[in-house]
Image (cartoon, rainbow, N blue to C red):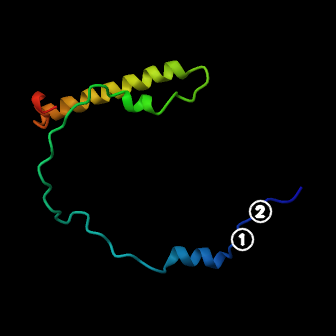
Amino acid sequence: MSPPRRNQARPNQTQGRRRGGHRSKPVDLWRPVPQLGDPEPIRPVGDPGSLLRSLGDVPLQGQGQVAEHHLAAVVERAAGLATALAAAAGLLAAPEET
C-alpha cells in the first residue's frame, strides 16, 4: 500500500499567492446606481407545478410519490405568496391582461 499523496506544490509557491501579488482595488458597495425602469405587470400562471412535472419523476426510490406531493405543495405555496406580494405592491396584471 502506498502512502497518501501530499500537495506537490512547493510551500513558497502557495504562500506567495496568498501574501501579495495582484491586489484588486476595493469596490464601493454604496455607490449610486442607475434608476431601474418600471416593472412589467406580473401575471400568475394557471398551473405553477407544470415546470416541476416537466422535469420528470423525483429520483427517490420508494419515496417518489411523497416527494412529488411535497415539492408540488411548496411550489404552489411559493406561487401563491408571490402573487400576494405582487398584488400588495400593485404589480399584479389586471385579469383582462392575462
Which label was assigned to residue 42?
none
Residue 13 percent coordinates (x, y): 62, 78
Q: Are marks 2 and 1 in contact (CB under 8 Å)?
A: yes
In which quarter of the view is residue 11 placed? bottom right
Taking depth in this image into account, of 48 and 54 the one nearest to the observer is 54
Amino acid of disc 2: Arg
> In 3D space, how far apart are the residues under numbered discs 2 and 1 (Cα atoms)?
8 Å
Residue located at (45% from left, 79% from top) = 22
- Residue at 18 percent across and 37 percent down: it is 42
**Splitting the image into 4 quarters, where does residue 62 fall?**
top right
Mark 1 nearby-residue class (10 Å; few <14, some 14–19, many ≥20): few
Q: Quick one: SS at disc 1? A: loop
Task: Using the image, determine if residue 6 lies above or below residue 10.
Answer: above
Where is residue 44 shown, x and y percent of the image? 22, 31
Q: Secondary structure at mark 2?
A: loop
Question: Residue 89 vs residue 19: left or right?
Answer: left
Q: Position of residue 24 (x, y in %)?
A: 38, 75
Tag 1: amino acid: Gln
Would residue 68 be found to the left or right of residue 30 on screen?
right
Q: Which residue of the protein is positioned furthest toward the right in this rendering?
A: 1
Q: Residue at x 15, y 46 (%)?
A: 39
Q: Is residue 26 above or below residue 70?
A: below
**Label 2 crowd bin: few (<14), some (14–19), many (20+), radius 10 Å:** few
Nearer to me, 25 or 66: 66
Determine which residue is flagged by label 2.
5
Where's residue 52, x and y in %?
Answer: 42, 31
Quadrant for the C terminus, please.
Answer: top left
Tell me the tag on residue 8: 1
